[in-house]
Amino acid sequence: EVQLVQSGAEVKKPGESLKISCKGSGYKFVTSWIAWVRQMPGKGLEYMGMIYPDDSEITYSPSFQGQVTISADRSISTAYLQWNSLKASDSAMYYCARLGTLENWFDPWGQGTLVTVSS
Amino acid sequence: QSVLTQPPSVSGALGQRVTIPCTGTSSNIGAGYDVHWYQQLPGEAPKVLIYRAINRPSGVPDRFSGSKSGTSASLAITGLQAEDEADYYCQSYDSSLSSRIFGGGTKLTVL
């Protein structure tokens, strides 16, 4: 079974750094894209960017370029989403999702990681 | 404001049929880029419902169907059931943004 398992909920203060993870299993991790999607409280889905673990090619949505960093460690089949200095407005649910090279839709999705940034 | 436009909400009675439109532009749906639909049940992660405009993954009931024409796509749900109450999102690619994009989402209420 193809599965993405994300790291647990986080509570951080403004200005702190954070790295959340998404571990893939049940498929060849390096030859599928892993995307990150934000969902702010009560709002819709926003595509942030994605990484191709085989060669670490990364693309970002213009809205998130420079705001976050996407990375991956192919040796442990894990992708990451990182912030250097969190803001209260970063509080949201973050999902990772697999995107095949031919199957260009998001499937499956991780269970989500809730990030709360509050002083 | 999303590049793909969806109505914020739709409703229908049990057993009835509803449609959810997704209106794009010549730089996304109108350019021939694939359109996909996702269902997000309350408190859950999204899951793919329709891929490439008209295809259902295994396990998705045939009450759900998709279509695409010009710069728009549409999701139809027939024989509405209570468990269909969810948020529905269309998704495509936009060449002007060089980015995947989502519609703003539509909340379906089953009366």
Image: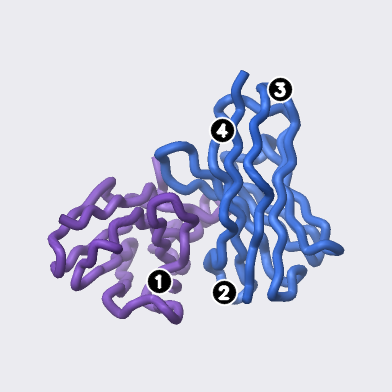
Tag 3 and tag 1 share a subunit: no
Q: Amino acid at mark 3?
A: Gly
Q: Amino acid at mark 1?
A: Ile
Mark 1 residue element? strand
State the purple chain: B
Q: Amino acid at mark 2?
A: Glu
State the blue chain: A
Marks 2 and 4 sit apart, C-alpha to C-alpha, by 31 Å
Residue annotated with mark 1 = B50
Q: Is residue B28 above or below residue A46?
A: below
Residue B96 spot, x, y in % from top left: 52, 51
Mark 4 residue element? loop
> Which mark, by number, is residue A15?
3
Residue annotated with mark 4 = A91
Identify the mark nearer the N-term, 2 or 4: 4
Answer yes or no: do the residues labelled 3 and 1 have beta carbons within 8 Å?
Answer: no
